[in-house]
Image: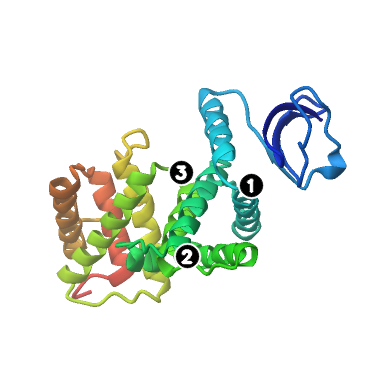
Amino acid sequence: MVIKRVFNNNVAMVTSDDGSELIVIGRGLCFGRHAGDAIDEASVEKTYALQEGTSQDSRTIDRLAHLLESIPTVNLVISEDIVQMLRRELNVDINDKILIALADHISLALERERKGISCENPLLLEIQQFYRKEYALAGRALQIIKEYMGIQMSEEEQGFITLHIVNATMPQRSDRLIVSVQLVRDVLAIVSKRYATTLDDTSLPYERFVRHLQFFAQRALDPTAGQINGDALFRIDETAYPCAFLCADAIAAHLSSTYNVVVTDAEKSYLAYHIVNLLGEPGL
């Protein structure tokens, strides 16, 4: 390994023997060393592979470089441990950019905790309800932070880390993710009100419905993703399920007035299909 850039005594960007660019971390790894010097691989404790080939990757490297120069190295190590835990538990391809976002968030959150500054999370209840698995994993992330730093973070911070996890597994802009949580909350309230019932949030149909709404919100809020259009296999007979379709129409009207989202007929049919699966059709 040859040093390409030194960030501090413990972190450097290096070029490996096969030409790959890596971020390497190790106690005192770069002490007295400069760009062009070789690094003993036995001294490397953590390795982070950098992807190359697109302008987005270049921006990611720049952000990582800025972050490494401004935060304690231990926060990057904590973030790396959390990312590895998530990859084991979720068994999905997790965007590497979560490492940067997590390290940055952890640094700010630890600073708030040390200063005794509370940070309200107005969507905490919805996050706990809609993203149960991710919220539980965020709790494990808080435990990792506590093991390193001896600081127990709040439920509010657990909620914020949950959003980072969701964003890494369902890539979308962070501002859209927050709006999507609000959108899902609104849709559930409309369904509950129109059917005059309290939804059973412990049931499997409810979990399936929420998961559908999460992906629907992502499609509805991201013009590049695009909603479902045209004929679809899930299209059901509107005359057989009038209540479900009227509910879907009410949802579409609310999304139009509140979020400036025009819901396609195919998406409304899909919503009605999931509403029927969740609650059936009155009188049938």
Look at the numbered disc 1 and give the secondary structure of its residue.
helix
User: Few, some or many C-alpha atoms within 10 Å of disc 2 (few <14, some 14-19, many ≥20)?
Assistant: many
Which of the labelled discs sits on residue 135, or is there none?
Answer: 2
Residue type of the residue flagged with mark 3: Pro
Alpha carbon separation for disc pair 3 and 2: 17 Å
The mark lying in front, picked from 3 and 2, is: 2
Residue 229 at least partly seen: yes
Rendered view: 273 above or below 24? below
Expressed as whole percent of the image width and height from the top left, the position of residue 100 reads 54, 43
Residue type of the residue flagged with mark 2: Tyr
User: Few, some or many C-alpha atoms within 10 Å of disc 1 (few <14, some 14-19, many ≥20)?
Assistant: many
On-image quarter of the C terminus:
bottom left
Residue 125 sits in which quadrant?
A: bottom left
Expressed as whole percent of the image width and height from the top left, the position of residue 51 reads 63, 31
On-image quarter of the N terminus:
top right
Which of the labelled discs sits on residue 73, or is there none?
Answer: 1
Decide which of 88, 123 is in the foreground and name it.
123
Circles 3 and 2 in contact, beta carbons < 8 Å = no
Q: Earlier in the sequence, mark 3 or mark 2?
A: 2
Q: Residue at x 33, y 45 (%)?
A: 176
Circles 1 and 3 in contact, beta carbons < 8 Å = no
Q: Residue at x 64, y 58 (%)?
A: 85
Alpha carbon separation for disc pair 1 and 3: 26 Å
Looking at the image, residue 138 sits to the left or right of residue 276; the answer is: right
Decide which of 274, 5 is in the foreground and name it.
5
Expressed as whole percent of the image width and height from the top left, the position of residue 74 reads 64, 52
User: Few, some or many C-alpha atoms within 10 Å of disc 3 (few <14, some 14-19, many ≥20)?
Assistant: some
